[in-house]
Amino acid sequence: GAGVSQSPSNKVTEKGKDVELRCDPISGHTALYWYRQSLGQGLEFLIYFQGNSAPDKSGLPSDRFSAERTGGSVSTLTIQRTQQEDSAVYLCASSFAGGVEQYFGPGTRLTVT
Amino acid sequence: RKEVEQDPGPFNVPEGATVAFNCTYSNSASQSFFWYRQDCRKEPKLLMSVYSSGNEDGRFTAQLNRASQYISLLIRDSKLSDSATYLCVVNLNTNAGKSTFGDGTTLTVKP
């Protein structure tokens, strides 16, 4: 079946602009996660959704970052007034409720110039 | 101290070698544990779960030591295709929730 998909695959934006990143989880997966990975670094947890609720937003680095999920499916991660340090690969993952094996999308590579 | 720590390596081994990675975690209440594999510029993919009794999948063996708060991954008869970064993952809850990833251990298997 279809895996996790993310769009766009690459995004280049100017400093100060807003960007929206999209994630389509695997059908039937109620849990959805956003991570950030800078070049050569590990995964940094950003936010987790169970259904449309986000019980854990502890990883969002600043108030410029926000995320929402609608219909228990698609999620968008929005970064306002982007900064150069926001440049990274943004990874989305989904899993069944009750199971924690996560399935990752291919990521969105964000470059802020 | 990081919640999940791994030796970053790199580990450079010849084909056919046996190699082992360790991962330590700080929260003794952690409930579930996994190893993921990440190839260069690709997304992480689940390699195997780690069970208290230890588990094996072909050439790969994972073990958990709750008393010492570490998990291990053993790879026997290394193949060139095993070259990747191996990520240790720890969860506080078994029912979804935040996962904490280690920074990964890089393995290069050489001919």
Image (cartoon, helix red, strand yellow):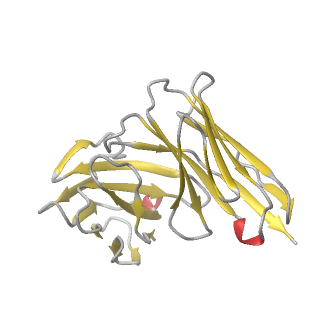
Residue found 26% across the figure and 50% down from its top: A97
Residue B2, image quadrant: top right
Relative horizontal placement of residue A58, taking residue A68 as reference (left or right): right
Does A30 appear above or below B69? below
- Residue B9 is situated, as x and y percent measured from the top left of the image, at 75, 50
Q: Quadrant of the C terminus of chain A?
A: bottom left
**Which of the two residues, A15 or B23, is positioned nearer the viewer here?**
B23
* Quadrant of the rendering where the N terminus of chain A is positioned: bottom left
- Note whether A79 is above or below B33 in the view shown: below
Relative side of A47 to A35, left or right: left
Q: Decide which of B10, B23 is in the foreground and name it.
A: B23
For image coordinates 65% across by 59% down, the residue present is: B85
Q: Residue at x 35, y 56 (%)?
A: A34
At x 46% / y 70%, what residue is drawn?
A111
Q: Position of residue A43 (x, y in %)?
A: 50, 52
Who is closer to the viewer here, A62 or A81? A62
Q: Position of residue A5 (x, y in %)?
A: 34, 74
| Depicted A53 relative to depicted A11: above or below | above
Name the spot of residue B42 as percent of width and height, x first.
54, 70
Q: Is residue A93 left or right of residue A64?
A: right
